[in-house]
Structure formats: structure tokens, C-alpha cells
């Protein structure tokens, strides 16, 4: 699986979003991770479709949107129109309507993904991966969603290993507390899409951190380290 390194723009200077995005792409980012929080599903409020629409005017980059919202279905159309690339919703907020969400996300030209909070069991996402209209990425939260700068939860790696063994060609993303000291564990467990906010934006040389992430994922993928 290809490595995708996605700086979380939550850690950027939101008042200079376009230039921060350009800087990350210059530093080697593959995707830009956009954290959408509604102040209800999580105790924090960030950005919505209008900001995605504004940023889209400045870049053709893949905008990996992570929706930490109570009613993901309501966001599909606005995000599609705004130019989002990936639409990753939470299983905890979509137990009754995930099929409808996936269908509408695809119809809107976006790539569907599902995310799970630390307390949610991994088997809850199997039906979404095995459906005839499946999600194309699973985002395993490695912190409680809501804020950047939290500590990585290594116990979440069981979920990543389980998913990687069961679905060898699935995009598996990890989000929360990723940095040079935690990437090895995440990569060797089978994660290939890496989200990181504070460790990238807080670094003197973000390009170096992005390159450490990439090497780690590529090495682990080559040796299939999760099989050991
Ligand atoms: C947290 C967000 C993350 C956050 C990660 O709810 O989903 O994307 O920005 O930040 P760091 O890398 O600082 O833990
Ligand atoms: Zn996120």
C-alpha cells in the first residue's frame, strides 16, 4: 500500500490557511487532513464547508476531510460542492444510515471513509468494508477526537493489525499523537496513511518529519511487518 502523509491543518495557522497548505505540499505532504468538528459530536468547533470551498480555490491537493459531526449525512452535499476529496465520517454517528452516506458520498464524487473512536470495537466497521459499496479507507483514531496535541494510544494498534491482516489492500489511516517516536509502531502494525498535526507543524523542518513518516511506512509495507 502506498504511503500517504497527511498533515492535520488543525495545527496550522487558520488565518493563513492557503499559504500553510502550500507550505505543507512543498514539504512533501501527499494529502491535507481537514478536521471538521461540530461542537456536539466532539467538544470543539472548527471549520465547515465554506472554508473547504475557499481553500479549494488555492490548491488542487487531495483534501482528506475527517468529519467529527453528529449528522454526517447533512454534510455530504455541501462538502461535495465545496470540493472535498475524501469524506470520512464516524461509525458512532452513522449506525443507522452508513449505506446512504456512502452512496451519496460516491455520487458527489468523493472518496468514502469511516473512522472509529478509541472506545469503539474494530468489528463495527467490517460491514462497511465488506459492503458492495464499501468505504475505501478506515481511520483508526489513536486519541479521543476533538483536539490536537494529545498522547498516542498504542493499544489502538491491535485494531490496525487486525484490519491489515484481514484486508491487505485497504487504506488504513491513523490520527492522533503521531510523531517520530510513535510512527514505527503505527507503520509496523500496518497503517499506511499517517495524519499528524503538532509533530509536523511544531517541527523546525516539517519536511524531515514527513520524510521520516514516509520511510517508516514504506519500510514496514515492504517487509509486511505486521505478519511477524
Ligand atoms: C483530533 C484530530 C486530529 C488532530 C491530530 O481530533 O482528528 O487530526 O489534528 O493532531 P496531533 O497530530 O497533534 O495529535
Ligand atoms: Zn483528524
Image (tube, rainbow, N blue to C red):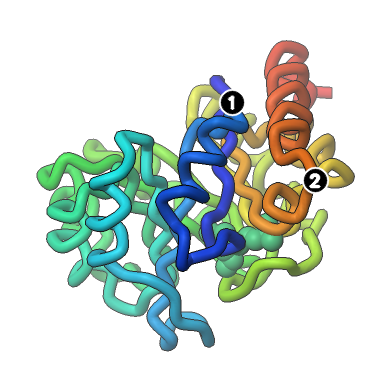
Residue 112, image x and y in percent?
A: 31, 45
Apparent side of residue 85 relative to residue 73 in the rendered image (left or right)? right
| Comes first in the chain, label 2 or label 1 | 1
Q: Is residue 165 visible?
A: yes
Apparent side of residue 216 relative to residue 57 in the rendered image (left or right)? right
Q: Nearer the viewer, residue 119 or 77?
A: 77
Q: Nearer the viewer, residue 41 or 203?
A: 203
Residue 117, image x and y in percent?
A: 57, 66
**At numbered mark 2, what does the secondary structure look like: helix, strand or loop?**
loop
Task: Give the total number of marks visible in the rendering.
Answer: 2
Residue 185, image x and y in percent?
A: 82, 40
Residue 81 falls in which quadrant of the image?
A: bottom left
Residue 53 falls in which quadrant of the image?
A: bottom left
Q: Nearer the viewer, residue 104 or 193?
A: 193
Give above or below for 187 relative to 80: above
Residue 214 falls in which quadrant of the image?
A: top right
**At numbered mark 1, what does the secondary structure look like: helix, strand or loop?**
loop
Classed neighbour count for the residue bearing mark 1: other residues with Cα under 10 Å, few (<14), some (14–19), many (≥20) = many
Task: Check mark 1 vs ligand 1: CB closer than 8 Å? yes or no.
Answer: no
Residue wearing tag 1: 3
Apparent side of residue 93 relative to residue 172 in the rendered image (left or right)? left
Instruction: Please state, as top left, top right, bottom left or bottom right, where the N terminus lies in the image.
Output: top right
Give above or below for 90 relative to 88: below
Please give the name of the residue rendered at 23% of the width and 39% of the height, measured from the top-left corner.
133
Residue 204's tag is 2
Name of the residue lying farthest toward the top: 222
Amino acid at each position: 500500500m502506498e504511503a500517504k502523509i497527511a498533515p492535520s491543518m488543525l495545527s496550522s495557522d487558520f488565518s493563513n490557511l492557503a499559504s500553510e497548505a502550500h507550505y505543507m505540499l512543498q514539504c512533501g505532504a501527499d494529502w491535507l487532513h481537514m478536521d471538521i468538528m461540530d461542537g456536539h459530536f466532539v467538544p470543539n468547533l472548527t471549520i465547515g464547508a465554506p472554508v473547504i470551498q475557499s481553500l479549494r480555490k488555492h490548491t488542487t491537493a487531495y483534501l482528506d476531510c475527517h468529519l467529527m459531526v453528529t449528522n454526517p449525512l447533512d454534510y455530504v452535499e455541501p462538502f461535495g460542492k465545496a470540493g472535498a476529496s475524501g469524506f470520512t465520517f464516524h461509525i458512532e454517528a452513522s449506525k443507522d444510515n452508513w449505506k446512504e452516506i456512502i452512496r451519496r458520498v460516491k455520487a458527489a464524487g468523493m472518496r468514502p471513509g469511516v473512522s472509529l473512536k478509541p472506545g469503539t470495537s474494530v468489528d463495527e466497521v467490517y460491514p462497511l468494508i465488506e459492503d458492495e459499496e464499501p468505504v475505501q479507507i478506515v481511520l483508526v483514531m489513536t486519541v479521543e477526537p476533538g483536539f490536537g496535541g494529545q498522547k498516542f494510544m498504542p493499544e489502538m494498534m491491535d485494531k490496525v493489525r487486525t484490519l491489515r491482516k484481514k484486508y491487505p489492500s485497504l487504506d488504513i489511516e491513523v490520527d492522533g499523537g503521531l510523531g517520530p517516536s510513535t510512527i514505527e509502531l503505527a507503520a509496523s502494525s500496518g497503517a499506511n496513511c499517517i495524519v499528524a498535526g503538532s509533530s509536523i507543524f511544531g517541527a523546525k523542518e516539517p519536511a524531515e518529519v514527513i520524510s521520516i513518516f514516509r520511510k517508516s511506512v514504506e519500510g514496514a509495507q515492504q517487509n509486511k511487518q505486521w505478519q511477524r
